[in-house]
Amino acid sequence: TITFHNEDAGIYHNVAVYEGDAAEAPPIFNGAGFPGVATHTYKFTTPKQAGNYSFRCDFHANMVGTLVVEGG
């Protein structure tokens, strides 16, 4: 579960998770975009394989991060 607080009034954001480089990989999860100011909770199943996965806002390519999936 990812709870995303969009504090940008009238600006759309989303959260999308990618396997590998977000610029080139197909999405594992692509959350719907929504305008702020608002909060949205995304629910999805993480990959079963441990590792690092890229995430970003598809509306703003500079908004990026890493989702870490731990094994065990």
Image (spheres, rainbow, N blue to C red):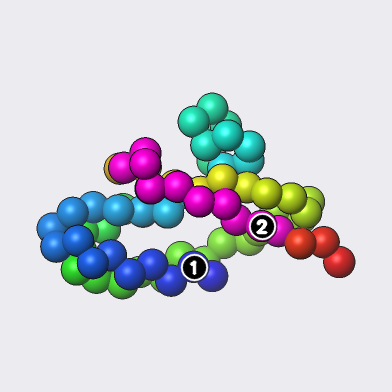
SS of the residue under disc 1: strand
- Split into 4 quadrants, where in the image is the C terminus? bottom right
Which of 29/8 is in front? 8
Which residues fall within the magenta stretch? 60-69
Left or right side of 14 for 25: right
Which of 11/41 is in front? 11
Residue 8: image x %, image y %? 19, 61
Residue identified by numbered label 2? 68
Tell me the number on the disc at residue 40: none
Displayed quadrant of residue 40: bottom left
Please count the marks in the image.
Answer: 2
Q: Residue 66 lies in magenta, yes or no?
A: yes
Residue identified by numbered label 1? 2
Residue 20: image x %, image y %? 63, 37
Left or right side of 1 for 10: left
SS of the residue under disc 2: strand
| 25 relative to 17, above or below | above
Question: Hey, what amino acid is under mark 2?
Answer: Val
Residue lying at the far top of the rendered structure: 24
